[in-house]
Image (tube, rainbow, N blue to C red):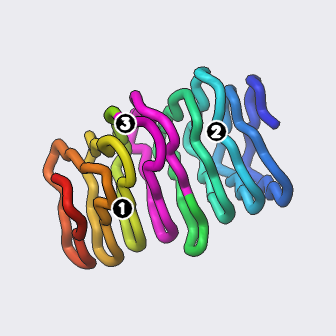
Amino acid sequence: RQDGGELTGPGALVLDGPFQWNSGTMSGSGLTRANGPTTLGTGSNKQLDGRLFLNAGALVWTNGAVLVYAGGVISNLAGATFELTFDGTASINTGNGSFDNAGLVRKSGGTGTASWNWNTRNHATVEARVGTLNFNGPFTQTAGLTLLDGGALGANPPLQLLGGVLAGTNT
């Protein structure tokens, strides 16, 4: 559990059990790999500064912003789930941070708009079940599926669909 402070350095931290990130900073040239259930909670900021965060399990984002700085990367691995259960600004991208999806990203909660402000690369599945998932940073899909399953998408700049499928019934 991280409730503030800073995890930093060039090494790897592998989390095999449940992990809750409520606030604080992960920085340095190392990586954090979450293999077990992970919760991004509370209304406080979580900061990823130049570090690689690998989600290999079931991650649920319930509240607060994740600020990605200085080339930090969040990678949702194949077989992993990254679930967004609230509205508001879900993320803020500063200094070339990015999100790489090879698993499932799903907006399943909040009937309003969640703003997704990372440079996003989708190779698997993005699903909007409720409300609007608004991409305010570059979104590039090279394979996979972007599915509107009761929810809607927004984008500025426009989505770049270079491969895969855009399906569903909302805009």
Residue tagged by mark 3? Answer: 111
Q: Position of residue 9 (x, y in %)?
A: 74, 43
Based on the picture, tell me whether residue 117 belongs to the magenta stretch. Answer: no
The disc, 2 or 1, on the residue closer to the chain's N-terminal end is 2
Q: Say which element carries label 3.
A: loop
Q: Amino acid at mark 1?
A: Arg
Counting the numbered discs, the total is 3
**Front in this rendered view, residue 67 or 151:** 151
Residue tagged by mark 1? Answer: 121
Position above or below: 81 against 30: below
Residue tagged by mark 2? Answer: 40
**Front in this rendered view, residue 103 or 119:** 103
Position above or below: 45 against 38: above
Q: Amino acid at mark 2?
A: Leu
Residue 12 is left or right of residue 142, and the answer is right
Based on the picture, tell me whether residue 94 belongs to the magenta stretch. Answer: yes
**Residue at x 61%, y 21% (from the top left corner):** 44
Q: Amino acid at mark 3?
A: Thr
Mark 1 crowdedness (10 Å alpha carbons): few <14, some 14-19, many ≥20: some
The disc, 1 or 3, on the residue closer to the chain's N-terminal end is 3
Q: Position of residue 6 (x, y in %)?
A: 74, 29
Q: Position of residue 69 (x, y in %)?
A: 48, 36
Which quarter of the picture shows residue 31? bottom right
Q: Say which element carries label 2.
A: strand
Q: CA distance from mark 2 to mark 1?
A: 21 Å
Image quadrant containing the N terminus: top right
Magenta part of the chain: 82-111
- Does the residue at mark 1 contact the one at mark 3 (Cβ under 8 Å)? no
Residue 27 shows up from this direction:
no
Q: Nearer the viewer, mark 2 or mark 3?
A: 3
Q: CA distance from mark 1 to mark 3?
A: 25 Å
Mark 2 crowdedness (10 Å alpha carbons): few <14, some 14-19, many ≥20: many
